[in-house]
Amino acid sequence: MDIKEKFEEFIAQYPIFEYRLLNAADVSVHERVRTICREECERYGSTWACPPAVGELPECEKKIHSYSKAIFFSSVAEVSDIMNMEEMLLTRKAHEELTEKVGEFFKEEGYETFILSTESCDYCERCAYLDGKPCRFPEHMHPCLESYGVVANEIVEREQMEYNLGGNTILWFSMVLLRK
């Protein structure tokens, strides 16, 4: 059984909505995303998963391109009111757990992995970054796609994936980079 068949068998037990296997070299990074982080995101400069802690954009691009493949996938969550940000963010934890399971699957198959996920890490109530200390749980700290300059909806459009299901549904996206 090849890795794609094994992965499809694995994900059949999880709520992955869609996925694509990408060449990591085709994943591009954009400075405009960093500008948005710097100017509009309250998490900027407050966590190991966000800029500037994740490094300069050329470093991030080099890291992404040091991997050969990437699994880009989404999961769906439903809420009672799409405008309720607090309720929406509560659904993120299940996606983060799913993302870690996907990463573990590939590790068990002999791949080295690096995960880029949704939003910024909120594993700890207060990030050690704020105290000038190393991350306490690096195995759970996954930088968000945007912190690395990746534009998720660009990949979604190129790969002809769903981005908005309408109603009170949310699509969360993650990427697991792979190399043997």
Image (spheres, helix red, strand yellow):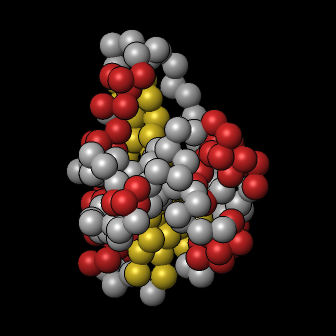
Q: Position of residue 74 (x, y in %)?
A: 45, 45
Q: Position of residue 175 (x, y in %)?
A: 49, 59
Answer above or below: position of 45 versus 24.
above
Q: Position of residue 30 (x, y in %)?
A: 74, 56
Answer above or below: position of 86 versus 71.
above
Residue 143 visible in this rendered orientation of the protein: yes
Image quarter for residue 69? Answer: bottom right
Q: Which of 34/106 is in front?
A: 34
Answer above or below: position of 63 versus 149.
below
What residue occupies the far left of the structure in this picture? 13
Report the label total. 0
Image quarter for residue 128? Answer: bottom left
Residue 71 visible in this rendered orientation of the protein: no
Q: Which of 42/176 is in front?
A: 42
Residue drawn at (63%, 45%) of the image: 37
Q: Which of 35/30 is in front?
A: 35
Residue drawn at (55%, 48%) of the image: 44
Q: Which of 121/132 is in front?
A: 132
Residue drawn at (40%, 41%) of the image: 75
Give the left or right position of residue 93, taking residue 148 as reference: left
- If the image is split into quadrants, where does the N terminus sit? bottom left
Give the left or right position of residue 67, taking residue 75 as reference: right
Residue drawn at (45%, 87%) of the image: 180
Give the left or right position of residue 72, taking residue 156 as reference: left
